[in-house]
Image (cartoon, grey):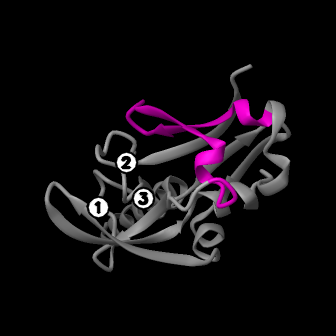
């Protein structure tokens, strides 16, 4: 009886950990297809730390540039963003259905010095369940409407 109980606990733990690992995935969809990036893929990118004000409280966020995540998935920046590509946007989707749009030139250092980050740490700790595993942070925006919580997908869309 005790062995059966332990077996059930072990099975439940394995199922639960699989769900946690799956939630650490981020889908990036481009015109050439869909790519799923895991936490290790994202954390392997160069890290950036930024202190930003959230509801008048300073918070230290750590993550990676959103541009670097998209570049890892095959999105090109720099000289290739001209002409028709200026009408491409990034659609950021959250677990709760919240969606925002960011124009690709807003992410390109050739166009702006503004930082847009995909963060996974807040004050040195993993983002909480209501906020993570990933969140968009744009430190110099006056309103936090595009600071998407629980980011699940990034999609390149053409608005021609």
Q: How far apart are marks 1 and 2 (CA)?
A: 15 Å
The secondary structure type at the circle numbered 2 is loop
- Indicate the quadrant containing the C terminus: top left, top right, bottom left or bottom right: top right
Residue 14, position in %: x, y? 48, 64
Closer-to-camera residue (155/9): 155
Write down the region rendered in magenta: 85-111
Closer-to-camera residue (153/8): 153
Q: Distance between the residues labelled 3 and 1?
A: 7 Å
The secondary structure type at the circle numbered 1 is loop
Residue 72 belongs to the span the image colors magenta: no
Q: Residue at x 67, y 46 (%)?
A: 28
Residue 113 image-quadrant placement = bottom right
Pointer 3: what residue?
Answer: 133
Q: Which residue is drawn at 16% across and 54% down?
A: 55
- Indicate the quadrant containing the N terminus: top left, top right, bottom left or bottom right: bottom left
Pointer 2: what residue?
Answer: 147
Of badges 1 and 2, nearer the viewer stands 2
């Amino acid at each position: 009886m005790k062995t059966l109980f332990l077996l059930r606990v072990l099975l439940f733990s394995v199922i639960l950990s699989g769900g946690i690992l799956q939630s650490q995935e981020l889908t990036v969809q481009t015109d050439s297809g869909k790519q799923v990036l895991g936490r290790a893929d994202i954390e392997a990118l160069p890290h950036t730390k930024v202190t930003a004000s959230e509801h008048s409280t300073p918070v230290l966020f750590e993550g990676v540039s959103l541009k670097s995540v998209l570049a890892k998935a095959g999105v090109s920046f720099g000289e290739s963003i001209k002409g028709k590509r200026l009408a491409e946007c990034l659609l950021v989707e959250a677990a709760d259905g919240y969606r925002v749009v960011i124009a690709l030139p807003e992410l390109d250092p050739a166009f702006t010095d503004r930082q847009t980050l995909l963060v996974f740490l807040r004050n040195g700790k993993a983002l909480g369940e209501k906020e993570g595993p990933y969140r968009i942070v744009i430190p110099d925006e006056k309103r936090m409407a595009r600071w998407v919580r629980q980011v699940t997908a990034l999609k390149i869309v053409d608005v021609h």
